[in-house]
Amino acid sequence: MGNPVHKILHGGVTAAILDTVGSLAALMYGINGLTDEYLIKVFYQKLPNGRTLDMKADYLRPGKGDEFVATAQVIRRGNKIAVCGMEPHNQDQLHIATGTATYVV
């Protein structure tokens, strides 16, 4: 939280959420039939090697709310680089921010 009295997310928290969902989408893109063994391999072997090359966050309104959901969409993924778009929303479906990031996968 940024301001617990007004229930507003701090911009750094919003950016961290955007980066997290974007990196997960980039790593998991195109995987069908997820198994526990594969998830363990991805999270313990690939995730530490994944890096954010660039990220841009545009804050559209104050992050007011009690619950937040962030979604990510892979715009393009190659063999080594992925570009994702991310959006967090509050419980009222208000669009709080938008982000674009490039990841090493």
Image (tube, rainbow, N blue to C red):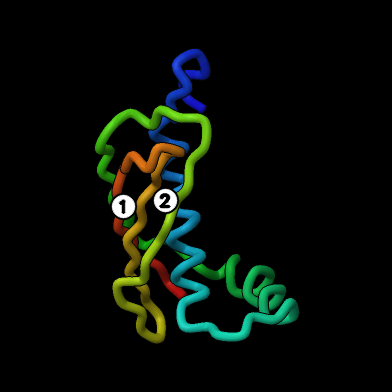
CA–CA distance between discs 2 and 1?
6 Å
In the rendered view, tell whether residue 85 sits above or below residue 91: below
Q: Amino acid at mark 2?
A: Leu
Residue ID for mark 2: 18
Q: In the structure shown, which secondary structural element does the residue marked by tag 2 occupy? A: helix
Q: Position of residue 101 (x, y in %)?
A: 33, 60
| Residue located at (52% from left, 74% from top) | 28
Q: Residue at x 40, y 81 (%)?
A: 80
State which quadrant residue 43 falls in: bottom right
The answer to whether 78 is drawn above or below residue 44 in the figure is below
Residue found at x 47% / y 63%: 23
Q: Position of residue 56 (x, y in %)?
A: 28, 51
Q: Residue furthest right?
A: 37
Mark 1 crowdedness (10 Å alpha carbons): few <14, some 14-19, many ≥20: many
Tell which circle, 2 or 1, labels the residue nearer the N-terminal end.
Answer: 2
Q: Nearer the viewer, residue 10 or 52?
A: 10
| CB contact under 8 Å: marks 2 and 1 | yes
Q: Residue at x 28, y 38 (%)?
A: 59
Q: Is residue 98 left or right of residue 4?
A: left
Question: Residue 58, labelled with which disc?
Answer: none
Please tell me in which quadrant of the rendered image residue 8 appears.
top left
97 or 53: nearer the viewer: 97
Q: Position of residue 105 (x, y in %)?
A: 46, 75
Outermost front residue: 92
Q: Which residue is mark 1?
A: 99
